[in-house]
Image (cartoon, coloured by chain):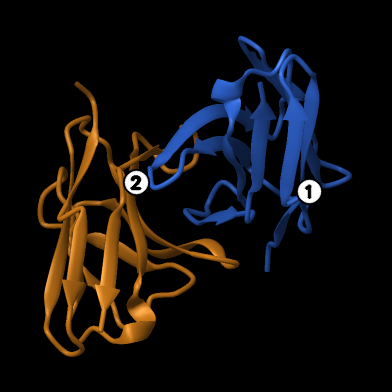
Chain colours: A orange, B blue
Amino acid sequence: EAQVTQNPRYLITVTGKKLTVTCSQNMNHEYMSWYRQDPGLGLRQIYYSMNVEVTDKGDVPEGYKVSRKEKRNFPLILESPSPNQTSLYFCASSPRASLYEQYFGPGTRLTVT
Amino acid sequence: KQEVTQIPAALSVPEGENLVLNCSFTDSAIYNLQWFRQDPGKGLTSLLLIQSSQREQTSGRLNASLDKSSGRSTLYIAASQPGDSATYLCAVRSGAGSYQLTFGKGTKLSVIP
């Protein structure tokens, strides 16, 4: 089944403890992206990647890191999480960025205390 | 900077009614526009993608139109059903060279049996 998977689905952590949210797609898509969704603010793009080893900042990249060493994986790294990073995070992928629709993962609900 | 607005923020209709959801964007130089559905606590499901050269797209009971010059799109849902209850989001990609997707905040639809 074609899908985008994220792990973990739920995470509660403390301020400053490094964490990684994994994202994997099995559709051989070139483009992958991370979003966060907050009440009243909607979905905002954090980082995106056009292909392996090619990444760029979205609208809200501060406090996050990404890497794209393999085509299928695009992990999101929070080196020192803070409470304002409490949010619902989505990973997405598409065959090419501009022409095709994006497929979204199920989301990761992160709480930083 | 592109801004996407969706009005109304919430809508409640009786089952069987036809309805229209609105999406407007500030920069008409878009590449494409995509409508999504989001169920509570879940990821986004793509409904329709309209390229900038197209005027409308149809899928089953859904019809999306695009008027690029006026910066508007509508999502028409025919013969609404309780299963259509969800939040509907529109997202705009601004330009062929852009890999960023700008989302509206969504319209929460409730279809009353």
Where on the picture, by quarter, is residue B12? top right
Question: Residue B6 appears at what percent x and percent y?
Answer: 73, 50
**Quick one: SS at disc 1?**
loop
The structure residue drawn at horizontal position 68% and vertical position 69%, both measured from the top left corner, is B1
Quadrant where the image shows the C terminus of chain B: top right
* Mark whose residue sits in front, 2 or 1: 1
Which residue is situated farthest in the top direction here?
Answer: B60
Disc assigned to residue B28: none
- Residue B44 versus residue A52 in the image, above or below: above
Residue to which mark 2 is pinned: A92
Residue type at mark 1: give it. Answer: Pro
Disc assigned to residue B8: 1
How many circles with numbers are drawn on the protein? Answer: 2
Report crowding for label 2: few under 14, some 14 to 19, many 20 or more residues within 10 A (C-alpha). Answer: many
Question: Residue A54 appears at what percent x and percent y?
Answer: 26, 60
| Left or right relative to B34: residue A86 | left
- Chain that bears disc 2: A
Residue type at mark 2: give it. Answer: Ala
Q: Are marks 2 and 1 on the same chain?
A: no
